């Protein structure tokens, strides 16, 4: 019995060795490399070049490819690709428990080819119509140190995933760049089109970079071969829950970002979207259409923003303080997020509470020009209680269709514009001075402009956001004064007395 057992064992060793040697002789070197190059070129519709190829049969059937280049010029450079599967299942015409590892590679987006669909991968059939090889499962798909570049951005990615039938389970996907660090988990159905459900958690996130990479997967605006994805022409659908400790968008620092994200082909929607901004909070929605031009629609609500930080970010430090709340709806388009925001159009309303405007005391200076204050008059202040405005935005110009400011020295109402390019102010306002300051005005000024014990002065707003100027509209002031004087005398003539309104 012992001799029979040894004989059988020796026979098995010889058979395995013979099969292995035959595999190496038949499939290693130029023969297998050329065969794979030809098949891959036909499959992808782009030239494929392989530097080295080797095959193993024990303990698992495997193929290792080195120095793969796809495209002319090459946009995909894969340094090392390893594929292995269960040998027993392969002999039964099944790919089962397969493993794929891709390492040390560079992929330039957009891809120069369409991703083949499942229909295209199972075209080879037997005489009875059954698939020649059935893809059952891929227990491991690993990416190691893959660099993806798109529109001047570069992201390094690694991943571990598995494929069972047409469902891909993403156990872990990481992306790292100078400004982005995120981890993705979830699953995706690959047929009849890609339908993914993901959770995205980030330590830091650059939304400009994220959109640039997303744009790389969208179709070209006209006639782009192979950009639509699978043979069915259906674009991917992705839903994701996104969170980030910190983020940036168009150079603005954000914190505690949270959003429900939906990607349907070239459309991206973040709703609801919330994040911290300038010590306040933003809540709203963002709809984007990706492509050669980025199109955005934003519905925004702001609460509790630090206006001093906002002004400093806009290039006007030490000009205004307070707490900003408001809302607005805007549309924008441009080559990237920054360009799109620069072209924004829309309308909204805003209020700033309990703040200061540098040189707001100029209002008091105007009053002092006409009269002498009492010795115990309080000093003028730069403070205001509240500013409210309804505005529109177009071509980088804010237009305050209605403007009102309440302060201790004066109430200001009117309309005006702020040109963002030069921070230029222009407008027509009316100053309703406090009773205290009105009492300090000269008697002639009071007679001509007094209404309910408060002096009213028409004025022009000019200067810049850093150096605002208010000048009295003398012609309008004289006209108002003459009207008041005529009315006063008519009241006296008809028995109304000489009392002012």
Image (cartoon, rainbow, N blue to C red):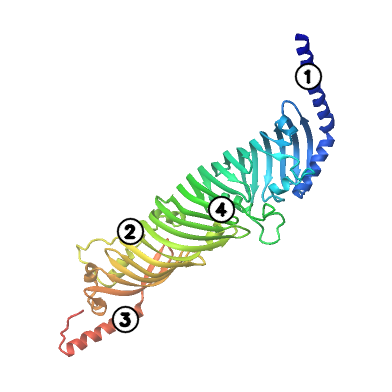
**Of discs 3 and 2, which sits in the foreground?**
2
Which residue corresponds to mark 1?
13
Residue at the spot 73% in from the left edge and 48% down from the top edge: 120
Q: What is the distance, in whole Å, between disc 1 and disc 4 at their CAs?
A: 55 Å
Q: Position of residue 79 (x, y in %)?
A: 72, 37
Q: Which mark is residue 353?
A: 2
User: Could you tell me which secondary element the residue under label 3 belongs to?
Assistant: helix
Q: What is the distance, in whole Å, between disc 2 and disc 1 at their CAs?
A: 86 Å
Disc on the earlier residue, 2 or 1: 1
Q: Is residue 463 left or right of residue 112?
A: left
Residue 422 vertical position relative to residue 45 in the rendered view, above or below: below
Disc on the earlier residue, 3 or 4: 4
Disc on the earlier residue, 3 or 2: 2
- Badges 1 and 4: C-beta atoms under 8 Å apart? no
Q: What is the distance, in whole Å, between disc 2 and disc 4 at their CAs?
A: 38 Å
Which residue corresponds to mark 3?
478
Work out whether residue 300 or residue 323 is closer to the camera in this orientation and state it: 300
Residue 236 vertical position relative to residue 61 in the rendered view, above or below: below
User: Could you tell me which secondary element the residue under label 4 belongs to?
Assistant: strand
Q: What is the distance, in whole Å, between disc 3 and disc 4 at their CAs?
A: 62 Å
Q: Within 10 Å of the Cα at label 3, are there few (<14), some (14-19), or many (20+) other Cα atoms?
A: some
User: Could you tell me which secondary element the residue under label 1 belongs to?
Assistant: helix
**Of discs 1 and 4, which sits in the foreground?**
1
- Residue farthest along the bottom direction in this orientation: 494
Residue 167 vertical position relative to residue 280 in the rendered view, above or below: above
User: Could you tell me which secondary element the residue under label 2 belongs to?
Assistant: strand
């Amino acid at each position: 019995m012992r001799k029979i057992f040894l004989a059988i064992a020796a026979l098995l060793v010889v058979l395995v060795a013979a099969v292995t040697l035959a595999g190496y002789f038949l499939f290693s070197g130029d023969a297998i490399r050329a065969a794979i190059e030809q098949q891959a070129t036909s499959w992808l519709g782009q030239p494929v070049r392989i530097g080295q190829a080797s095959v193993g049969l024990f303990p698992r059937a495997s193929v290792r490819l080195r120095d793969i280049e796809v495209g002319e010029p090459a946009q995909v450079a894969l340094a090392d690709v390893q594929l292995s599967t269960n040998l027993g299942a392969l002999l039964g015409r099944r790919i089962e428990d397969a493993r794929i590892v891709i390492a040390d590679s560079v992929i330039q987006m957009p891809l120069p080819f369409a991703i083949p669909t499942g229909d295209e991968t199972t075209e080879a059939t037997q005489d009875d119509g059954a698939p020649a090889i059935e893809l059952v499962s891929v227990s491991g798909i690993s990416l190691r140190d893959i660099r993806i570049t798109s529109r001047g951005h570069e992201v390094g990615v690694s991943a571990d995933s598995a494929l069972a039938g047409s469902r891909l389970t993403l156990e872990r996907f990481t992306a790292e760049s100078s400004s982005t660090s995120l981890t993705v988990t979830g699953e995706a159905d690959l047929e009849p089109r890609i339908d993914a459900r993901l959770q995205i958690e980030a330590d830091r996130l650059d939304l400009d970079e994220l959109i640039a990479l997303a744009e790389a997967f969208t179709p070209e605006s006209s006639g782009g071969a192979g950009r639509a994805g699978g043979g069915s022409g259906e674009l991917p659908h992705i839903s994701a829950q996104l969170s980030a400790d910190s983020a940036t968008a168009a150079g603005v620092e954000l914190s505690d970002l949270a959003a429900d994200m939906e990607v349907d082909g070239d459309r991206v929607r973040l709703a609801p979207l919330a994040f911290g901004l300038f010590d306040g909070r933003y809540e709203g929605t963002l709809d984007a259409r990706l492509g050669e031009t980025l199109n955005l629609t934003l519905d925004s609500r702001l609460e509790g923003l630090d206006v001093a930080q906002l002004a400093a970010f806009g290039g006007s430090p030490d000009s205004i303080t307070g707490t900003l709340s408001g809302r607005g709806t805007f549309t924008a388009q441009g080559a990237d997020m920054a360009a799109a925001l620069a072209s924004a159009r829309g309308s909204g309303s805003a209020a700033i509470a309990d703040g200061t405007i540098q040189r707001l005391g100029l209002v008091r200076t105007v009053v002092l020009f006409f009269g002498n204050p009492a010795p115990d008059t309080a000093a003028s202040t730069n403070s205001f209680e509240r500013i409210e405005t309804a505005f529109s935005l177009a071509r980088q110009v804010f237009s305050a269709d209605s403007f009102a400011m309440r302060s201790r020295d004066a109430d200001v109402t009117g309309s005006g514009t702020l040109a963002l390019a030069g921070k230029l102010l222009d407008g027509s306002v009316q100053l309703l001075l406090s009773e205290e300051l009105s009492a300090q005005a000269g008697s002639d000024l009071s007679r001509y402009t007094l209404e309910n014990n408060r002096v009213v002065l028409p004025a022009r707003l000019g200067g810049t956001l850093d150096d605002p100027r208010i000048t009295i509209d003398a012609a309008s002031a004289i006209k108002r004064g003459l009207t008041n004087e005529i009315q006063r005398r008519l009241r006296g003539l008809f028995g109304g007395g000489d009392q002012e309104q």
